[in-house]
Image (cartoon, helix red, strand yellow):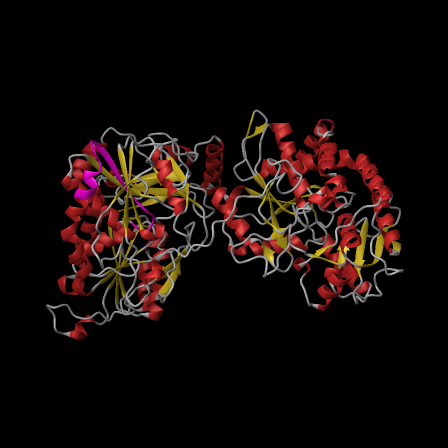
Amino acid sequence: MSERVARKETANVVWSGSWVAQRLGVELVGDGKPDGDRELRDLLGLALRRNPKRAHLLVSNVLGKHVPQKPSVVYGAGFELGRRVCELLGDAEARRAVVLGYAETATGLGHAVADGLGVAPYLHSTRRPVEGVERAGGFEESHSHATSHLLLPEDPNLLAGERGPTDADTDTDAYADAPLVLVDDEFSTGNTVLNTIRALHERYPRSRYVVVALVDMRSPADQGRLTEFAAEIGARVDLVARSSGTVTLPEGVLEKGRALVAAHEGAGSASPRAAVEQGRRPCTRVDLQWPAGVPDGGRHGFTPAHRTALEPVLPAMAARIAASLGDARRVLILGFEELMYAPLRLGTALEDHTDAEVRYSTTTRSPVLAVDDPGYAIRSRLVFPAHDNPADGPGDRYAYNVAGAGFDAVVVTVDSTADTPELHAPDGLLAQLAAHTDHVLLAVVPSYVPSGLPSYVSERQEPPMLPEPLRGPAFSSYAPDEVGWLLQDLSDTELEAPTEEREEAIQSGGAHYAESLPVEYQPSAQYQSLFKAALDLSAARVARAVGTVTETVLAELPHSRKRGGTPSARPVLVSLARAGTPVGVLMRRWARHRHGLDLPHYAVSIVRGRGIDANALRWLAAHHDPADVVFVDGWTGKGAITRELSAALDGFDGFNPEIAVLADPGGCVRTYGTREDFLIPSACLNSTVSGLISRTVLRSDLVGPDDFHGAKFYRELADTDVSGHFLDTVADHFDEVVDAVDAEAKEMLAADRAPTWEGWAAVERISEEYGIHDVNLVKPGVGETTRVLLRRVPWKILAKRGAGADLEHIRLLAGQRGVPVEEVDELPYTCVGLIHPKYTRGATGADGKAVESK
């Protein structure tokens, strides 16, 4: 389609960037040529995304990624750029060139550029590692939501500038130092391309590079960098773009963009996942009869010989698709992430074979806000789980401008690696499409296996499906909606060991504390009475802290907004099992009681020295936006778990490592209900106040690489279970503390709540003062001191002089175990428990006895 016809079609149509431009002040300015501004607007619209590096998104109308477009227009845009590169290089140099495209958006564009050059081999970067294929390089994309690019050519010499001659040439030396053509959809800052060239030039130096893009949107400050860079590496670097201009961004646009995304996400602009109608057939398979030996794309390289084999069979494959379309008059060919070229060429062939209106686009990893407004580039989105076992784990994927676009049929084109149960699942892509079109067809292109590799390499090496969360009453005494446990049930496994034996093994380095469980403490009648009295005394205080921390979380979630006083955000509460679980349940109850919000709540395992359960994070990322996850714990001691979580999340994108706690006496977090060290009754007991669930277990013979961490459900302790009583007693005080909570939350949101780490400093001082020299054996705070007395072998208890009712249960437990309680001044905590630094069987207390059992 000519540019003249394209402009005629878009005449008198609202520009698809006007919505963002009006609200953020973002402008597209042409390069000063006649109709420069109009040409940019024909090529580009604007959208917003939740990305900490760049809020706005330039949405191409001719790329075939986010906006369905005629396949011939998409292919023609890339092919024409290839012809311009050929003119720039000259025929002789063009025949020696190698083309490299960028995943995922430019894989099809780069392939079309290579076709325009004529005989150039093509390779695109990939985010899918393939076992057995040696990496020829890699680089980072600085502004992207998913940055790592791999280069995996089947021919290791493809990027080395050492191509052999074609049949028409005999001068082998003429193929040294082949020009490298790099293709991306847009050239914004130039960082990605410069990173690529720098990385490749160090390994495969050459004298000439050509950068190709649909649009060159560099700022004046960035435009001179390419020339300086070329001089720095001693090579020529040319730029070829269909159009050029700049994006003007007003001050504070990133923050304004985040707020705008937050407001519209909160308003429910994102399309929910749909389900297949009962009895409806989700798709019809089309046997393409893809030619043997022809790669599905350029992940491992695509040569002129491959192109020669593909072109003659495209009409027959298009005919097979057309035969399955019935009377559909508006058809979408939907590609899959990096698989852009194969469906694009099927689309161009289908245009020639049918009178139906054919459009082409692909699914994507990129999360973009959808707003149903003609002045916005992304009108709708479908959300579905990843279905190709990506290296970065499962997560949501998206198809834009498909729902509501009036397609009679959608032809989903994937490679065989992505033809998985997830694709066909009730919430998978095929089911999502079935809700919006009458016919869903599935065309599968065989995943290419590089020569010399066994055929199984390209097959999906899938870990077992992660199970759904465990819920009560089958696992735990909590109601099923209160919490989902991302754990495996080890209830039938013998894991308990005597306290003294565990302590000896832990301190000697012979075992990790998470490899076994202490024998569950059975409270005496006296201790049970003490717990109930403590609960009656402190329930209102706990309720106030629950309300304060919950209101703080609701107010500070990145996309939280209030309408009529009610938060519209839906944080996902993720408790650190098990001490955080009762707190998470109470926070969920507060949000429902006060605001009518039913917050998702899960419990996951984190182990000091071993990190958080990575499979639990995988599950969370597959079912929720990681940015919505709020980790919850009961209290802080010295901050060891706070540091552990922060370190453990380094390898996982999108999760916020901050923890929300009921009490923060250690000054280790910024989201808390109080910083007072007071008695939280749930710390007084073990499983019988935590849904009858043990602490978590991580042992290699029980927990495999694809398993959740484990825990036990002590069903046999049901008669002494007070979990529900604890929750109900605290929740009964919610109404009476509302005014106090509102005042405290308002004050807290305005205060400087930066962590002081006062507790850590105190622990280090105590460790040295008492000759322990190991901070792990110093357990500060009422909660941690209780744990020492219930699970470990205590040496002595330090109590703040004058502490009253908060320490009654501590004194009772210490008396039962013959542990001295030493009153001290200037203690930042109400009490501190010390584990004996040189454990022996004689160091169990004055009489060597374990905790008294009923």
| Residue 130, percent from left and from top | 37, 61
**Quarter assignment of residue 359:** top left
Query: Which residue is at a point 76% across and 48% down the rendered structure image?
Result: 783
Residue 377 in view in this figure = no
Q: Residue furthest left?
A: 168
The answer to which of 308 and 762 lies nearer the viewer is: 308
| Residue 321, percent from left and from top | 21, 42
**Quarter assignment of residue 132:** bottom left
Using residue 558 as the reference point, say whether residue 346 is left or right of it: left
The answer to which of 280 and 200 lies nearer the viewer is: 280
**Number of marks in the image?**
0
**Quarter assignment of residue 382:** top left
Query: Which residue is at a point 72% across and 54% down the rendered structure image?
Result: 638
Question: What's the magenta region?
Answer: 319-339
Residue 308 in view in this figure = yes
Give above or below for 20 relative to 466: above
Using residue 605 as the reference point, say whether residue 363 is left or right of it: left
Give above or below for 692 relative to 794: above
| Residue 479, percent from left and from top | 63, 35
Using residue 431 as the reference point, say whether residue 320 is left or right of it: left
Give above or below for 502 relative to 417: below
The answer to which of 72 and 263 lies nearer the viewer is: 72
Query: Which residue is at a point 68% across and 40% down the rendered structure image?
Result: 583
Residue 791 lies in the magenta stretch: no
Task: Please identify the quadrant where the N terminus is shown.
Answer: top left
| Residue 738, percent from left and from top | 70, 28
Give above or below for 336 relative to 840: above
